[in-house]
């Protein structure tokens, strides 16, 4: 009985931190589509979602990708997106002007991958 209570208490304590660790998509402006063709300068292949960096409009933009499992299931690998790799990114900018965008699709080496 104590073990069941202990497990329930631990789960209850972990849920709020998991919810705070990930942001929602409402901070991106889906009415403003951005299309960037440029080489990536950095790549993080990790969860809750991958990310990259790219130079755009004289700023370094953070690129918010999809979760690793989704990207790999759709045929996108970290080798395809390494730093210096020319890509075309289509996505939405943050509403607050932060140089960050949520990516909907990536085109690399003639292959387009839908991330959402």
Image (tube, rainbow, N blue to C red):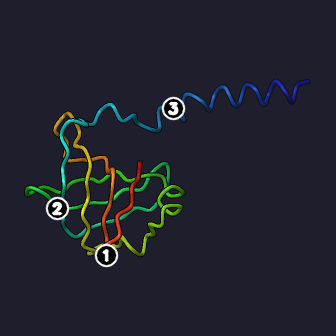
Neighbour tally class for label 1: few under 14, some 14-19, many 20 plus, Cα within 10 Å: few
Q: Earlier in the sequence, mark 2 or mark 1?
A: 2
Q: Secondary structure at mark 1?
A: loop
Q: Secondary structure at mark 3?
A: helix
Q: Is residue 35 left or right of residue 51?
A: left
Neighbour tally class for label 3: few under 14, some 14-19, many 20 plus, Cα within 10 Å: few
110 relative to 88, above or below = below
Alpha carbon separation for disc pair 2 and 3: 31 Å
For disc 2, the marked residue is 55
Image coordinates of residue 24 in percent, x first then y, are: 39, 34
Q: Residue at coordinates 42% horizontally, 75% vertically from top-left? A: 79
Q: Nearer the viewer, residue 64 or 87?
A: 87
Q: Residue at coordinates 33% horizontally, 55% vertically from top-left? A: 105
Give the farthest residue toward the right. Answer: 1
For disc 1, the marked residue is 109
Q: For the image shown, how many numbered marks are present on the structure?
A: 3
Residue 34: assigned label: none
Image coordinates of residue 41 in percent, x first then y, are: 25, 68
Q: Residue at coordinates 76% horizontally, 26% vertically from top-left? A: 8
Assess whether mark 1 and mark 3 are in contact (beta carbons under 8 angstroms): no
Q: Residue at coordinates 24% horizontally, 72% vertically from top-left? A: 86
Assess whether mark 3 and mark 2 are in contact (beta carbons under 8 angstroms): no
Neighbour tally class for label 2: few under 14, some 14-19, many 20 plus, Cα within 10 Å: some
Q: Secondary structure at mark 2?
A: strand
Q: Is residue 5 left or right of residue 107?
A: right
Look at the image and tell me in which quarter the N terminus lies.
Answer: top right
For disc 3, the marked residue is 19
Q: Is residue 67 left or right of residue 80?
A: right
Q: Nearer the viewer, residue 64 or 115?
A: 115
Task: Write down the quadrant of residue 94 in the picture.
Answer: top left
Alpha carbon separation for disc pair 2 and 1: 19 Å
């Amino acid at each position: 009985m104590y073990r069941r209570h202990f497990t329930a208490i631990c789960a209850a304590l972990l849920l709020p931190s998991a919810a705070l660790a990930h942001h929602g998509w409402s901070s991106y402006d889906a009415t403003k589509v951005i299309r960037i063709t440029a080489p990536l300068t950095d790549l993080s292949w990790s969860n809750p979602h991958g990310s990259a960096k790219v130079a755009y409009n004289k700023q370094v933009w953070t690129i918010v990708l999809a979760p690793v499992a989704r990207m790999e299931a759709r045929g996108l690998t970290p080798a395809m997106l390494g730093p210096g790799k020319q890509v075309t990114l289509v996505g939405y900018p943050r509403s607050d002007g932060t140089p960050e965008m949520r990516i909907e699709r990536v085109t690399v080496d003639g292959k387009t991958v839908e991330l959402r």
